[in-house]
Amino acid sequence: MWYCADFMVGAGMVVLQPATGKVLLLYDPRGQYWFFPKGRKDVGKSLERTALREAYEEVRVFLPR
């Protein structure tokens, strides 16, 4: 049996660049896997705001400098 407290709401996005047909994928060298930006929704925030925040945060962390 599962209760509501056992679940969380998340949001993510696929970032496309239509002019070139490119898709943004991020790479985590620690776990050695590729992924789309995603993350947990904070209380009181919309899914759209969550997806934008997660994309911004993860691109800053995982893109080469």
Image (cartoon, helix red, strand yellow):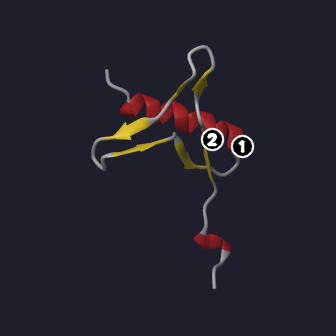
In this rendering, the answer to whether 27 lies above or below 15 is below
Which sits in the foreground, 25 or 2?
A: 25
Quadrant holding the N terminus: bottom right
What residue is disc 1 on?
A: 46
Which sits in the foreground, 20 or 47?
A: 20
Res 9 quadrant in image = bottom right
Res 61 quadrant in image = top left
Dot 2: element:
helix
In this rendering, the answer to whether 4 lies above or below 54 is below
Which sits in the foreground, 42 or 7?
A: 7
Whole-percent x and y of residue 65? 31, 21
At a point 37% along the width and 33% down the height, the residue shown is 62
Mark 1–mark 2 CB contact (< 8 Å): yes
Question: Which residue lies most toward the front here?
Answer: 21
60 relative to 30 in the view: left or right = right
Q: CA distance from mark 1 to mark 2?
A: 6 Å
At a point 63% along the width and 41% down the height, the residue shown is 50
Whole-percent x and y of residue 15? 58, 30
Whole-percent x and y of residue 46? 72, 43
Question: Which residue lies most toward the top here?
Answer: 19
29 relative to 35 in the view: left or right = left
Dot 1: element:
loop
Q: Which mark is residue 35?
A: none
What residue is disc 2 on?
A: 50
Q: Tell me the amino acid under the disc marked 2.
A: Thr
Specify few, some or many for label 1: CA neighbours under 10 Å numbering under 14, 14-19, or 20 or more: few
Specify few, some or many for label 2: CA neighbours under 10 Å numbering under 14, 14-19, or 20 or more: many
